[in-house]
Image (cartoon, rainbow, N blue to C red):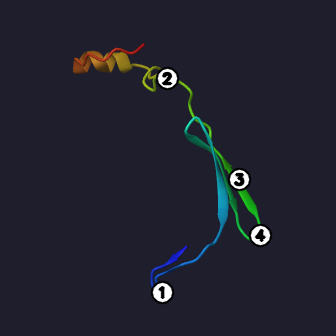
Amino acid sequence: MFDNIKKTETKSAEGTLTYKDGNIIKVEEKSSSSTKPLLFDYDTKKNPLKNILGFNLLLMKLNTPIKIK
């Protein structure tokens, strides 16, 4: 925590970051009285535009040469 008036920094908590395949999957924050875990899930699909309904129709309107596999 940073105090703008006093220009000092105070430690309010500490924690652990857990990585998997370069992504943060868990943040565990420990304060004086409790531990708060946060879990993250990531989409594993290769192409984020693949399952957008009607996206191919937009491509025809825009005349863009993007191919979605």
> Which of the two labelled residues, at mark 3 and mark 1, occupies the earlier sequence position?
1
Q: Which of 48 and 46 lies nearest the eye of the viewer?
A: 46
Which residue is labeled 4 in the image? 33
Looking at the figure, which quarter contains the N terminus? bottom right
Q: Quadrant of the C terminus?
A: top left
Where is residue 25, by image quadrant?
top right
**Could you give the CA–CA distance between mark 2 and mark 1, rounded to whole angstroms?**
48 Å
Q: Residues within 10 Å of mark 2 (few under 14, many from 20)?
A: few
* CA distance separating discs 4 and 1: 26 Å
- Label 3 sits on a secondary structure element that is strand
Mark before the other along the chain sequence, 2 or 1: 1
Q: Label 3 to label 2, Cα distance in Å?
A: 28 Å
C-alpha separation, residue under disc 4 versus residue under disc 3: 14 Å
Residue flagged by tag 4: what amino acid is it?
Answer: Ser
Residue 34 percent across, percent down from the top left: 76, 64
Q: Position of residue 24 (x, y in %)?
A: 59, 44
Q: Which badge, 4 or 1, is on the more N-terminal residue?
A: 1
Please give the count of numbered marks on the rendered protein: 4
Which residue is denoted by mark 2 in the rendering? 46
Q: Vertical placement of 66 versus 6: above or below?
A: above
Q: Position of residue 12 (x, y in %)?
A: 63, 72
**What label sits on residue 37 in the rendered view?**
3
Q: Which residue is mark 1?
A: 6
Q: Are marks 4 and 3 in contact (CB under 8 Å)?
A: no
Name which quarter of the figure residue 36 lies in: bottom right
Crowding at dot 3, Cα within 10 Å, few <14 / some 14-19 / many 20+, comes out as few
- Callouts 4 and 2 close, C-beta under 8 Å: no
Whether 35 is drawn above or below 56: the answer is below
In the rendered image, residue 39, in percent from the top left (x then y), is placed at 66, 45
